[in-house]
Amino acid sequence: MKGIVDIMKNKKRFFYHRLLFYILGLLIMSVGSNLFLKAALGVAPSCTMALTLSYLSPIHSYALFNFLINSTFLVCEALILHEFGKMQLTQLGLTFVYSLFIEFTSYGLFFIEPHGLAAKILLSVIACAVLSIGVGFTISSGFAVMPMEGLVKTISDKKNISFGAVRVCLEVLFTVCSAISSFVLLPELPSVGIGTVIAAFLSGNITNIFSSLFHKRINAYLGFQA
């Protein structure tokens, strides 16, 4: 009996560890997102549409449109699955938290003002590293997935297409649509640029390096088998 109680206590403790780890990942990701905005050379491919809409709208809130775009991903996922269950509600809540983090961390980075192309490129690389490490935290937690990943996984499972292929196709679609919209309507405020290319090429590799370096310690902290 005591053994069962101990197991239940450990499960509860590790649940909170994973939730905390996930939320910390969202916080780190929000800092990375805002650093991309500070660099002003474009954002990660999956975020280009939110930035484009924030430029076009009289309400210039990237955090708001990030939440709306992610909510749209959730709706699409629910339509494909024909259900909106506990997992989708969890994703919606975490997306809201992420958007709040984006809004509030932007105030703490007010002092960062890069001058010159070299400084902006360097800041974009730093932004990519920070964002990727945050993604590594959320993935390692095993707690939930962001709406974009949830939609990609749903399409991948339903159509029997590889996860990577679906993600690349969606990101290319978002990037092309954002690039066209920016070129036509926002020539002075591009949402797609060098920063987008940097994120496309580096983010996955940085996340993989982070995971390979720290996965044993992370797994031990989160109660996973090494």
Image: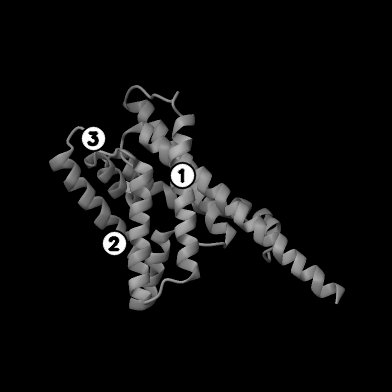
Tell me, for residue 169, which label it has, or none: 2
Label 3 crowd (10 A; few <14 / some 14-19 / many >=20): some
Please tell me whether mark 1 sits on a helix, a strand or a loop.
helix
Q: Quadrant of residue 7?
A: bottom right
Label 2 crowd (10 A; few <14 / some 14-19 / many >=20): few
Q: CA distance from mark 3 to mark 1?
A: 24 Å
Could you tell me which residue is drawn at 15 percent across and 40 percent down?
A: 185
**In the rendered view, would you say 132 is above or below 139?**
above
Q: In the displayed orientation, state which residue is furthest to the left.
A: 184
What's the amino acid at mark 3? Leu
Could you tell me which residue is drawn at 34 percent across and 53 percent down?
A: 68
Q: Of the residues under marks 2 and 1, which one precedes in the sequence? A: 1
Please tell me whether mark 3 sits on a helix, a strand or a loop.
loop
Q: CA distance from mark 2 to mark 1?
A: 28 Å
Say which residue label 3 marks: 189
Q: Of the residues under marks 3 and 1, which one precedes in the sequence? A: 1
Say which residue label 1 marks: 100
**In the rendered view, would you say 202 is above or below 155?**
above
Please tell me whether mark 2 sits on a helix, a strand or a loop.
helix
